Amino acid sequence: MDHAAAAIIGSLCDAPTLIMPNSRPQLARTLPGQGKATPNRSLERGVAILRAFRAGSSMLGNSEIAERTGLSRSTVSRLTQTLVETGMLDYIPQARAYRLGVPVLSMAHAMRDSSQVLKVATPMMVDVAMRHRINVGLAVADGDEMVYLESFRYNRRQSLRTVVTGQRIPMALTSLGRAHLSTLSPDDFARMMASFAGKGGGRGWRELRKEIEAAVDSVHRHGYCAASWQPQVVALATPMRFDGYAVHVLNVSVSGQQDTAAAQSALAGPLMSLAAAIEQGMRGVQW
C-alpha cells in the first residue's frame, strides 16, 4: 500500500468524527408509522452529543463536544445541561467535563435484551467459533461506522474472549462495512462514498474506492466479501436481512500468515452456513 493510500486510511480511522446531524450521511428509509413528520432538530443535536462519547473518550468538555459534533459551544452548553438534568450525562466539576450517565447503560441492556437476532445468533456463533477455531462477529451500521453487537474471538487455549459490545470499526475499510454497503440503493451508496471521499482524496481514495466496489461486487456474486485491514487478519462478511430489523452483517476471521485467497477458501463455507442457519432460525420468530 502506498503513502497516499495509507494517508486516507489513517484519516478514516483516526480523525475525529464530525457528527452534527446535518453532516451525517442521510440514507433514505421507509419507516412505518413515521409519516412525513418534521425531524426535531433539538433532539437530533442531543443525540449527536451522546454519540460523541466513545471508548477512549470517557469524559468530554463542552469544547471537545462542540469540536466532535460541529455544534456551537452555546448550543452544546444548553443541551448538555438538559442531558445532565435528565440523567443521560453526569457532570464532573473537578474536570469541568461530562461522562455518560447510568441510564445509557440501561438502554443498551434493553436493546440487547429485545433483539431476537442476538438470541438466535449467539449460541450458533459460539459453536462455529469453537468448532472451526475462528473469530465470529455480528454488527450493524451507524452512520459511516459499524458497531459490534457481539464478537467471539477464538484463541489457542480452546476458549473464547468477547470483544466489547458496542465497539466501532470503520465501514470503508472492513469486510463488515463493505458487506453492509452492498445492501444500499445506488443513491445511498453514492452518498456514503461521497462521505468517505470527504475525509481524504487523491490516489489513495481512488484505490480504496476500487477495493470497496470490488467487495460490493463480490457480495452480489458470491454472497460475501473479504478484507484485511488489520495486519495478519483476514475477514469475510455477509449481510443478513430480517423483518423488523436493520441489516445485520455477520463476519468470520482468522489471524496468522494465511493469504487472502487461502483464508477465503477456508472461511467461506462456515460463514455462509452460519448465515443460513441464523436466517432459518429467525423464520417465524416474533420480532
Image (cartoon, grey):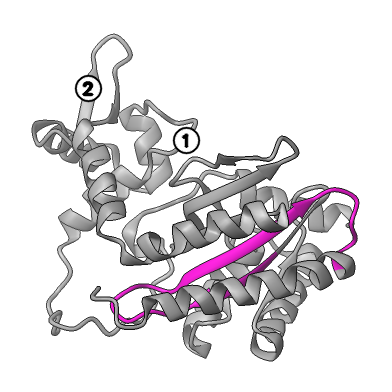
Q: Residue at x 29, y 46 (%)?
A: 108
Q: Residue at x 40, y 28 (%)?
A: 58
Q: Is residue 260 left or right of residue 84?
A: right
Q: Residue at x 70, y 48 (%)?
A: 10
x and y percentages locating residue 282 in the rendered image: 37, 76
Q: Secondary structure at mark 1?
A: loop
Query: On the image, which quarter does residue 118 sit in?
Result: bottom left
Q: Residue at x 45, y 81 (%)?
A: 280
Q: Pick the quarter of the image with the C terminus.
A: bottom left
**233 part of magenta stretch:** no
| Mark closest to the chain's N terminus, 1 or 2 | 1
Q: Which residues are magenta?
A: 236-260
Number of the front mark, 1 or 2? 1
* Residues packed near mark 2 inside 10 Å, few (<14), some (14 to 19) or many (20 plus): many
Which of 95 and 117 lies nearest the eye of the viewer? Answer: 117
**239 part of magenta stretch:** yes
Which of 153 and 56 lies nearest the eye of the viewer? Answer: 153
Q: Identify the residue position indicated by label 1 in the image.
A: 55
Q: Which mark is residue 91?
A: 2
Task: Tell me the amino acid under the disc marked 2.
Answer: Tyr
